[in-house]
Each structure stands twice: as structure tokens, then as C-alpha cells.
Image (tube, helix red, strand yellow):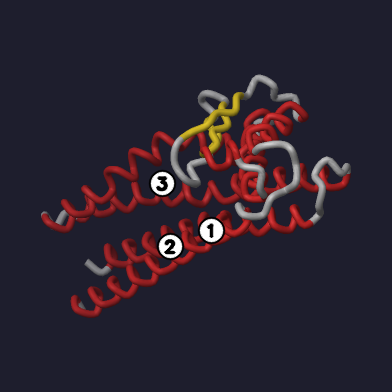
Amino acid sequence: MVMSSGIFYIVLMVVTLALGLGTQGYIQRMYSKFSKVKINLNATGAQIARKMLNDNGLANVEVRCVDGTLSDHYDPRTRVVNLSRAVFTGSDVSSLAVSCHECGHAIQHATNYSPLMIRTAIVPIANFSSNIWIILLICGFMFDAIGLVYAAIACFGFAVLFQIVTLPVEFNASKRGLAYIESGCNSSWIPSSEVLAGSKKVLTAAAMTYVAAALISIIQLLYYIGMARNR
């Protein structure tokens, strides 16, 4: 039984690792592909983000350049849309899609979008749980303390909850971003409807990484619950 459990765990880790690497590779390929497709618009990702924010009454939200690749994010604490340098300065489909997606988060914040509010509220607990659960799990098995094992599973459960709550937040931000791009195509300030199709591919690939992360976390949680029950 111990050997079977060990083999199952190895298989589980291989599958989840492959899933994670596969989705990360896919988003990087899509991002790279559409970063080469120019939008023939005399505006950068930063300028497009500024326009989208202003058009939605969010002139008080800043747009800043940050280091890193695919490091783009909206910070609700400071009300800042942070764009990676490539997106900040780029005039391509990937830059357009990513900048509008991040502005979608700013609009969520301004409108008190419930899933975002829930995710923001549980961030401290999720961060703490993510850091401590593995320590509790190891100690629980080392000292045969089933209470610590269940505490570890509960902590990991909070991390899984965060991954699940993240899904509607990311999907909705992409929906808002794509709606803005579509409106730009319809009003002709974005010159080609093909830009919308490319943006959808970039943001769909990005969404898949969140789906994969949530699925991996759920599978791991179920495995740990089963392992604890068999002790």
C-alpha cells in the first residue's frame, strides 16, 4: 500500500507538472507570436491603458512600468496598473490585450466587483496558509500527529480557495478588456478586427494558466485528504 501510494504520488506530480509547464509554455508562445503583430496604431500599451482608464472615469488610477516579463498586474492597494516594459512600450496585439486586461481589474475595483473584493480580502490568509501548510504536513507525518496533518490540509484548502476565486476575476477582466477592444474596432480607432481575434487568443491562453493552477491545486488537495484518511 505504501509503495502504491508513493507511485500514485509520483504520477500525480508528473501529471500536474506537465499541465503547469504546458500551459505556461502556451501563454508564452501566444504572447511571443502576437507581440510581433503590430496594430498600426500610434499608441503604446501604456497609452491605450491610459485611454481605457480615462474612458471609464478612472483618471486617478496610475499606469506604471515594471521590470520582468509577463509581470503585468493591477495593485488594488495603490490603485496602479503595472505593465511590464514590453507591454508598456509596445504597439502590438499582445501589448493591447494585456494592458486592457489589467485595466479591466481596475474597473472591477472601482465597481466593487464581488469576486475581486473576496479575493482581496482573503489574500493575507491565503499567503499565510501557502507558507505554513507544508511545514505542518511534514511535522504531522514525522510525529504521527494527525491533527497537524488536518491543519495542513485546512491551510492548503485556503490556498485552493484563492485559486478558485481567482478564476472569475481573471475571466471577467478579460471580458471587460475584450469589450473595450471590440468597441475600438467598431469605432475605428483600433484599425482592424483581426486585432480582436488575436487579443482573444492571447487572453484565452492566459486564462488557461489560471485554470490549470486551480485544477492542480484541487487534485493535490484531494490527494492529501485521501492520504490523511488512510492513516
Front of the two marks 2 and 3: 2
Residue behind mark 3 = 158
Give the tally of numbered discs. Answer: 3
Determine the image quadrant of residue 9. Answer: bottom left
Pick the front one: 82 or 3: 82
How packed mark 2 is, by other alpha carbons closer than 10 Å (few <14, some 14-19, many 20 or more), is many
Task: For residue 19, say whether it is visible.
Answer: yes
Pick the front one: 39 or 52: 39
Residue behind mark 1 = 27
Q: Position of residue 222 (x, y in %)?
A: 38, 64
User: In the drawing, does residue 69 fall left or right of residue 230?
Assistant: right
* Amino acid type indicated by mark 3: Phe
Q: Helix, strand or loop at disc 2?
A: helix
Q: Helix, strand or loop at disc 1?
A: helix
Q: CA distance from mark 2 to mark 3?
A: 20 Å
Task: Work out which residue is located at the far left of the displayed protein and give it.
Answer: 143
Query: Which quadrant of the figure contains the N terminus?
Result: bottom left
Q: Residue at coordinates 51% horizontally, 52% vertically from top-left?
A: 164
Counting residues from the start of the chain, the first of labels 2 and 1 encountered is: 2
* Amino acid type indicated by mark 1: Ile
How packed mark 3 is, by other alpha carbons closer than 10 Å (few <14, some 14-19, many 20 or more), is many
Q: Position of residue 195 (x, y in %)?
A: 74, 53
User: In the drawing, does residue 66 fall left or right of residue 152?
Assistant: right
Query: Which quadrant of the figure contains the C terminus?
Result: bottom left
Q: Position of residue 212 (x, y in %)?
A: 49, 61
Task: For residue 172, say whether it is visible.
Answer: no
Marker disc for residue 20:
2
Q: Residue at coordinates 88% horizontally, 42% vertically from top-left?
A: 187
